[in-house]
Image: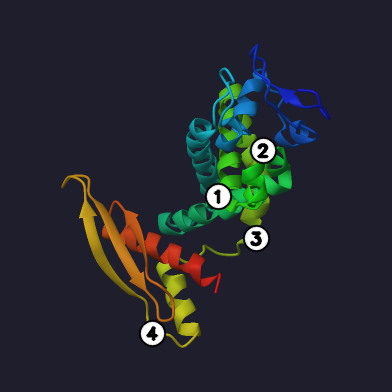
Amino acid sequence: MAMGHPLRSSVPGDRLTVPADGLAATLGHAFARPDLLVEALTHPSALLGRKLRRVTPYERLEFLGDRVLGLAVAEMLYLRYPDEAEGALARRHAALVRREALARVARSTGIAAAIVMAKGEEDTGGRANPGLLADACEAVIGALYCDGGLDVAARFVRSQWEALMEEAEGPPKDAKTELQEWAQGRGKPLPAYRTVGVEGPQHDPVFEVAVEVAGLDPVSGRGSSKRAAEQAAATAMLEKAKMV
């Protein structure tokens, strides 16, 4: 992949290109299959109404990249904190793979600037959307894995997540604890949780839990256990609270 030039899919007939200025050096990998990076950087909105062969939205690479990122970060934490219990490692892990962390990496590496999206998507703030940036970052990690293997993908993760790991002095608090402290710090009653539904078979249920905090509209979260659903609801409420 030449630096300073657009990256074009190698498949004949594909005309979609993505800007690659500086991106190759940041990723630390020259793609043998450049179409993988094209796919990783192609938002679904860019394909609406177009007839491009073999160029697909990045959801599949995003799915793969999410798992690769999770493994790479878990290994980093396992080696860096040999005396910490599983619960503390899990909280660190959750903070490092959440969309805000991924969006930061997407912006700092140039992935955000290289995403191809429809003009309408960009005009409505798509390039600044943390969820969209996180998805693209995961897709790029998936592309690195497909093209170069786990070592290549993990090397990129280590190069970008080391600094994020350094920022945390101790394991972050779980979402329910953080939400409780947020409410208490503002003189509000403690958050109230209630189960609003259970779906799925008995051996694989999905719980939905709502949480209420004075002064804010209720929100809900889903999970494979009541505790997981409560954590998801608390996380959603914290995101809403930060916008107030």
**Residues under labels 2 and 1: Cα distance?**
13 Å
The residue tagged 4 is: 189
The residue tagged 3 is: 167
Q: Amino acid at mark 4?
A: Pro
Q: Quadrant of residue 154?
A: top right
Mark 4 vs mark 1: in front: 1
**Is there a contact, CB below 8 Å, between mark 4 and mark 3?**
no
**Residues under labels 4 and 2: Cα distance?**
44 Å
Mark 3 vs mark 1: in front: 1
How many C-alpha atoms fall within 10 Å of the one at disc 4: few (<14), some, or many (≥20)?
few
The residue tagged 1 is: 131
Mark 4 vs mark 3: in front: 4
**Residues under labels 3 and 1: Cα distance?**
22 Å
Q: Earlier in the sequence, mark 2 or mark 3?
A: 2
The residue tagged 2 is: 115
* Helix, strand or loop under label 3: helix
Q: Amino acid at mark 2?
A: Ile
Q: Name the residue located 56 percent from the left edge and 64 percent from the top edge.
A: 170
